[in-house]
Structures are given as C-alpha cells and as structure tokens.
Image (tube, rainbow, N blue to C red):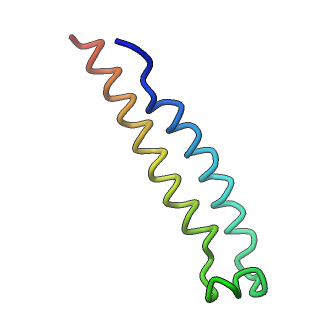
Amino acid sequence: MGVDIRLPIGFMFTILGLLLTLFGIFTTGDNALYSRSLGINVNLWTGILMLVFGGLMLFYAYRAKKMIKKD
C-alpha cells in the first residue's frame, strides 16, 4: 500500500508534546515567564494538545495496520 505518514507524525507530536508538557509542569510557578500570555501556562496546554494529537495519530496508524493484516 505504501508508507503510512501517521506513524512518524504521531511519534513526532508525542515526543515534542511530552517535552513541552514536562517543561510546562516544571515552570508552573514562574510568573515572569508567563506574564506575556496573561498568566496562562501556554507550554503546558500546548504540550497536552500535542500529546493528544500524537496519540490519535498513533492510534489511527495502529488501527489501519491491524485492519490491513485482518484482510
């Protein structure tokens, strides 16, 4: 069939999302860092969204691979 692009995209977003989420967790108390974003921990929320998106891509890649083997 070809190369499934969901797998590398899923890995990339999952790894980057994990790094960004961890950075957001460790810098939660730094008010000076988040003063420009109205006190919102943008790193944490963006990292969580990237983790969810990466997880969905990995799930869909796994599901597609499973369905191909089933046929």
User: How many callouts does the rendering have?
Assistant: 0
What residue do we see at 58% from left, 60% from top? 47
Give left or right: position of 52 versus 60.
Answer: right
Quadrant of the rendering where the N terminus is positioned: top left
Quadrant of the rendering where the C terminus is positioned: top left
**Image quadrant in which you'd find residue 66:** top left
What residue do we see at 24% from left, 13% from top? 70
Percent across and percent down for residue 13 are 55, 45
With respect to residue 60, does 43 lie above or below?
A: below
Give left or right: position of 51 versus 59.
Answer: right
Percent across and percent down for residue 23 are 72, 63
Percent across and percent down for residue 27 are 75, 73
Percent across and percent down for residue 20 are 66, 59
Q: Residue furthest left?
A: 71
With respect to residue 47, does 45 lie above or below?
A: below
**Image quadrant in which you'd find residue 25:** bottom right
What residue do we see at 68% from left, 60% from top? 22
What residue do we see at 48% from left, 30% from top? 7
With respect to residue 15, does 65 lie above or below?
A: above
**Image quadrant in which you'd find residue 28:** bottom right
With respect to residue 65, does 7 lie above or below?
A: below
